[in-house]
Image: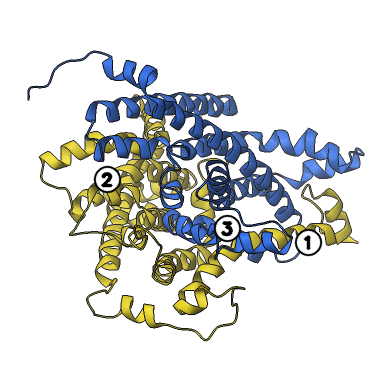
Amino acid sequence: MPSKFVGFDNYVNLFLYDPDFLDVSKFSLGFTVVTIFMEFVIGLFSALLLYGLVRGRRLITSFLLTPYMVAPIAVGLGWRLMWDRDLGLVNIFLGIIGISKINWLAESVPAFWAIVISEVWRSTPFVTMILLAALTSLSIDIFEAAHIDGANRWQTFWKITFPLILPPLAVSLMFQTIFKLRVFDIPYILTEGGPGTSTMPYGMLIHRTYFKYFDVGKAAAISVVLLLIGIVVALIYVRISKIKQT
Amino acid sequence: MMKSVTQNINPGIPTNSFSKGIVTILLVFSLLPIIWIILTSIKSEQQIFSIPPKIFVIPDFSIYKIFLGMGSNSAIPFIWNSLFIATVTTFLTVVLSSLAAYAFSRYHFKWADQLLIVMLATRLLPPVTAVVPLYLMFRYLHLLDTKFVLIIIYTAVEIPFATWLMKAFFDGIPKDLEEAAAIDGCNALQIIYKITMPLASPGIAATSIFVFILAWNEFMFAFMFTSVNVRTIPVRLAETMGEMQVYWQEMATLATVIMLPALAIGFFMQKYLVRAITAGAVK
């Protein structure tokens, strides 16, 4: 069969007539915003906690960083065991405080949160590590000066520490945004995108469109859309690092 | 006295019983799933399904014996594929990216900055967008389901980041030594191999570790581009999910086999690894 030039048909179909694409976009957006928010709150808090530790900082840091070393595929399967309806530790803990069993991976809202928490578990150490390195690179003199000038802890944080670690914070935020857009392993193992397409990231939609429905044109169109989103985020990152340099 | 002063100016959260409690919660949250996987891998089928869950068990290594033995269900071929691919990828990436990084760090040429930013931008793009064109291309070349295809893809994906990382390390090495060597009659290549590379060895170590772990852990490309001949250990792990059920003990055993090398490297070489991960963002 000879191939035919179709202009923008693939894109028109994608945006106007494809309910899956809309579902996948919704999931990706929600997933990205929620995980990044959680990772930054927990990451910043842990970095400050670790920096404030007088004793055992190195060892505790090593332990807190271990989830980032684990292969995402192993994270997925490990957490699948944690979320299991009957064997999972999560439901067992909930049982202890009197909450009845939740079928985490089979219903769309619990499945969303299960994926979010598994991803947060794996990626937060990345944020913690960058913020801890940023804190360690700051000269203690500034904080001494702030202390002498009578700034309290809260003021020191918001007026000095936070602005100083903002550039590395922004950089790791950009990286994490891209990592969330390209997520594949963890949702694939936990839910395979289900139920329906409610927890399906872009990568899995591309995979399914191409390897299951053999629709090369549509798979390529989704790839281009994702590529454009990636370029926009990358440009924002380049902007920020330029501002940082001047 | 000294200690209380540092405590006061330290911008971190001070150590008290409240913060110790939070640290404990974070530690449990971080380690419990890992410990649980390892524990499940040494439980017998019956112990896995017991409610409430058993914590103290007589270790049952039967699945380890199957996977690490020589029988037909052995996981050794998959481990070997992963090890081979990750090692070759690491070697290629480090050789190519350190030479590129040296040029970026030491020579001034047209478009150098723009090139660096383009390289970083390629890392920021989701690799999954390249799956369709790469698949078509490698099918045309009859390279699907070979070790070569994964090595090529991983190397291409890792080079931009490795170059940035190595450049940061080269930038930290003073030029004076190289100039002295040049005066003593070393040529450009001799300077690189005799002076700069030995000095950059911590950077090379950091980059190698990082690239190796990423290649060892990679699942998506391995899953899509290989089928029978060169399945890697992460792909074998995904196969423990049956149509209707997960084979928990097999899953946990393979997950432990994948995790342990990466955990050991991460734990003992934390210093290098932290440098590798933070080099791009801090400074």
Q: Earlier in the sequence, mark 2 or mark 1?
A: 1
Which chain is mark 3 on?
A
What is the total number of numbered labels drawn onto the structure image? 3
| Chain A shade in the render | blue
Q: Position of residue A92 (x, y in %)?
A: 64, 64
- Would you say B237 lies left or right of A51 here? left
Whole-angstrom CA distance, mark 1 to mark 3, is 17 Å
Which chain is the one coloured yellow?
B
Q: Residues within 10 Å of mark 3 (few under 14, many from 20)?
A: many
**Residue at 56%, 49% in the rendered image:** A114
Q: Residue at x 29, y 61 (%)?
A: B82
Horizontal and vertical percent for residue A41? 68, 42
Question: Helix, strand, or loop for circle 2?
Answer: helix
Q: Answer yes or no: is residue B185 visible.
A: no
* Left or right for A81, reference B180: right
- Label 1 sits on a secondary structure element that is helix
Instruction: Read off the residue under disc 2.
Output: B153
- Residue situated in front as seen by the camera: A149 or B136: B136
Task: Look at the image and tell me whether residue B231 can be seen.
Answer: yes
From the image, tell me which residue sits under label 3.
Answer: A65
Q: Amino acid at mark 2?
A: Ile
Q: Residue extending furthest top? A: A7
Callout 3: helix, strand or loop? Answer: helix
In the orientation shown, which residue stands out farthest toward the front?
Answer: A100
